[in-house]
Every structure is written in structure tokens, then in C-alpha cells.
Amino acid sequence: MHPNMDEPRVAIVSGAGRGLGQAICRRLLAAGTTVVGFDLQARNVECPILAVDIRDQQAVQAAVGEVASVHGRIDVVVNNAGVNHRGRLDQTPDEAWQDVLDVNLHGTRRLSIAAHPHLARSGGCIVNMASTAGTVAIAGTGAYGVSKAAIIHLTRVAALEWAGDGIRVNAVAPTIVPTPMTQDVLDDTEYMAAKMSSIPLGRVVQPDEVVDSVEFLASDRARMVTGQVLHVDGGVTLR
């Protein structure tokens, strides 16, 4: 039995402390959603932030339980927490490789599984943050690209397995977005010239343009959309 649909929806956003996570929280709040962020750090975020290490299954489970207990429901999960490591495959230490996959891929899986029973009760949805790096091979970002490719497939498998529970699962895959995570390459003239040449529309994606897609997939307007990857990439994946 679904909770009272007249009550505000409740969303969890991981990686809510900065960048895209902040922007997602603000947009959902503006739409009247109750938002709880998960992050180890928080800067200028209007919603409550729980200090959750997405690499810790018990911590994730406990935090999800706390949100459900306080608010009585969970309707939306946005798996936005992510890290990157730049370097060729043969120059990436095992520890760095494992950390990227642990946060990006396994963190997405942990939070999704922890929220599953609550989303099944509310008829809720999950929006995963993927990347064009998960579709198009980009040299020097092997760990990140592999993690995002796996998130894309995880999205499809979860959508298929959980459709019977009334849970929709989709992903948003942007090209480069100006955030603290990308600041190092945004300041690299040579890198950015090559990056712009790979984007047919010829510019980076702004955070609000990514958030537009997250908001859509999390809304009732997308009630028949599941298992999809929405590329917000200026045409990168056309090539």
C-alpha cells in the first residue's frame, strides 16, 4: 500500500555536499520535495545532510532507515556520489582503481538496495548519475569510465528486476560539467580544446541542464520511463 500521495515526496541525494549534488538538492527542494542529503562534507546546502560514507554498507543502511523513520517514506533516490582518478590504466594504482569503483559503482548499488523496500512501498524511483565516459572510451580516465559503464548496466538490470515492485530506475549521463571535480581539467587549455572538439554543440554542459534531466526522470512525467540512459552531452555519443 502506497503512502498518502498528498504528502510531500521524500528524496535522498548522495554526494549532496557540493557541485551537482547541491544543485539537485536545490531543484528538488524548489519543487516541494523533502530532501535529505548524504555526504561526508557539506557546504551551503539548504537541506539536512547526514554524514554517510557511501563505502560503508552498514552506515548506508542505517541512514536510509533514519530517513524512513523520520519522514515516513522514501520516494526518490539520486545516486550522485562519485570520485575520479585521472591516469592511464598502467599508471593507476590498485587502491585508486578500487576506491573509484567502491564509491561510484558499489555506492550506487548499496544505496539502491538499502532504499529498495521503501521505494517499493511508495512506488518510487532511482536516478543514477552516469557519464558519457561510460559510453565513449576516454583515455586517462579508465577507472572512472569503467565505473560509469557499469552503472549504466546496473541501471538496466535494476530497472528490469524491480519493475514488478513498481520502482523505476534510470540514469543521466552528462559530458563534462563545471564542478569542483572537473576544475583541474577546466583550467587545462590543451585538454579543454580537445574536449570541445568532441562535443558537436561545442560547449560544456551547465549544472542546471543536468538537473533538468534528473528532475524529469524523478517526476511523474516520466512514469513510463525506466531502464533508460539520458545523455546530456551535446551530441558526444553521436560519434
Image: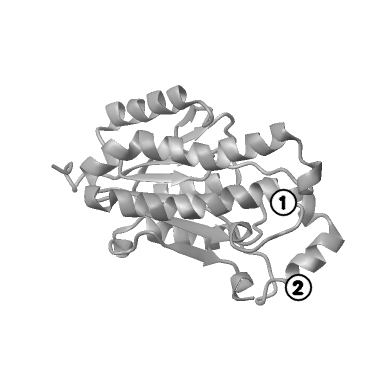
Occupied quadrant, residue 132? bottom right
Task: Classify mark 2: helix, strand or loop.
Answer: helix
Q: Earlier in the sequence, mark 2 or mark 1?
A: 1
Instruction: Give 204 or 22, whichever is nearer the viewer.
Output: 204
188 displayed left or right of 31 = right
In the rendered image, the residue lying farthest to the front is 90
Q: What amino acid type is highlighted by mark number 1?
A: Thr
From the viewer's perspective, is the residue at label 2 or at label 1 nearer? 1
The residue at which mark 2 appears reads as: 197
Checking the image for residue 141, the label placed there is: 1
Q: Residue at x 53, y 65 (%)?
A: 231
Rendered view: 45 above or below 170: above
92 displayed left or right of 3 = right
125 displayed left or right of 44 = left
Q: Residue at x 30, y 44 (%)?
A: 75
Instruction: Give 160 or 27, whichever is nearer the viewer.
Output: 160
- Residue 222 image position (x, y, % from top left): 33, 63
Q: Residues within 10 Å of mark 1 (few under 14, many from 20)?
A: some
Occupied quadrant, residue 15? top right
For the question of whether residue 36 can be seen, the reply is no
Occupied quadrant, residue 215? bottom left
| Quarter the C terminus occupies | bottom right
- Residue 98 image position (x, y, % from top left): 64, 35
Q: Residues within 10 Å of mark 2 (few under 14, many from 20)?
A: few
Rendered view: 107 above or below 204: above
Instruction: Give 141 or 36, whichever is nearer the viewer.
Output: 141
Q: Residue at x 50, y 25 (%)?
A: 56
Task: Classify mark 1: helix, strand or loop.
Answer: loop
